[in-house]
Image: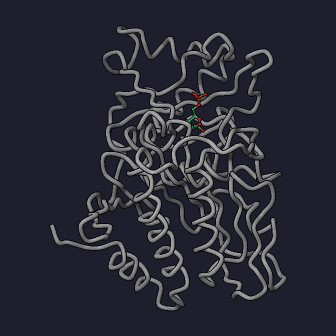
Amino acid sequence: MKIKTIEQHILDQQRKFPGASGEFSGLLYDIALAAKMIAKQVNRAGLANILGSTDEINIQGEVVQKMDKYANELLINILTHGGKVCAIASEENENIVEIHEDYLVGKYAVSMDPLDGSSNIGANVSVGTIFSIHRKVGKGYRGSEEDCLQKGSHQACAGYVIYGSSTMLVYTTGTGVHGFTLDPSVGEFILSHENIHIPEPCKIYSVNEGNYNYWNEGTKKYVNYLKEVDKASVRPYTLRYIGSLVSDFHRNLLYGGIFLYPADHKKDLSKPEGKLRLLFEAAPIAFIAEQAGGYATTGTQRILDIEPEHLHQRVPLVVGNKTEVLRYEDFLRRG
Ligand code: P6P
């Protein structure tokens, strides 16, 4: 297989759009650079005193891990100075991050979860960065919330970085899903998974069964169906759940699986709209899944069709093999 770096791949993609200014390619370079720098820190988090939590609580009401803060500040620093971005929406920031007046305002809006699953870092579990890129739609020179509050189907690009046994960057611009593995010895992302497609049949299901008692009936019946030998479309599924969205999704993307984070009514811990955020997690993951032949739904609505109402909007997320995700929707319809 020809060795192709992510930079070469991005340029090849850019050549397909003769009018392309190179601004989008430059933005992807910036994200790849940030990924390399975050990978370096994540891979030594246990050694540096960067492990553990700050004394801050973020907009989600979650304790901010030191690595969250590092990743968020690094990405904001690189993206706001790069001249390709008009606004950034981050899971760690209540409001959008605007571009300082001393810097060029670009034509892309970035929504991101800088370090998803970071509560797992202390246990050396894989974590990830998730990003979603929209074209600026606002009329003003500067960016605004409007540029981030766009439907998932309007994304120009979506991707994630998984900091695991190796560091991989997986992204789509709407012409397939491509994965690049970081070669730390040369600091380059090398194309390792071209045109990823979710394999059939679906063999894995990923869900936090600790919430079982608090799901709606359709969800309970669907998960029970997956366990019934004589009914499940393949041998009983394997349950794999890491509790780190990027890790769970990445494994299911490569091996074939369905991931569920449904709404639950867990008394004072209830998540009536699910736990995952539309802009920073569900929409980018859904774009990648659909480009890989899969599908993503809330259970009643295609994720990519949702008109966002506010930056930190949560949605139930069921994503993976299209056959299984559509089957889940059917179970929900029947209740
Ligand atoms: P639970 C990590 O905190 C996260 O946001 C996702 O990465 C992950 O899929 C989910 O929450 C896990 O949530 O409630 O199962 O621990």
Please name the residue shown 69% across and 17% down the image.
216
Q: Tell me if 270 is positioned left or right of 303 in this view.
A: right
On the rendered image, what quadrant is the N terminus found in?
bottom left
Q: From what the image shows, is residue 168 above or below residue 22?
A: above
**Ligand 1 placement by image quarter:** top right
Please name the residue shown 79% across and 85% down the image.
101
Q: Tell me if 318 is positioned left or right of 125 in this view.
A: right
Q: Tell me if 255 is positioned left or right of 206 in this view.
A: left
Q: From what the image shows, is residue 245 above or below residue 292?
A: above
Q: Where is residue 239 in the image (x, y as percent from the top left)?
A: 40, 21
On the rendered image, what quadrant is the C terminus found in?
top right
Please name the residue shown 32% across and 67% down the image.
189
The front one of 56 and 23 is 56
Q: Position of residue 316 (x, y in %)?
A: 66, 34
The front one of 33 and 318 is 33
Give the image quarter of residue 83: bottom right
The front one of 67 and 279 is 67
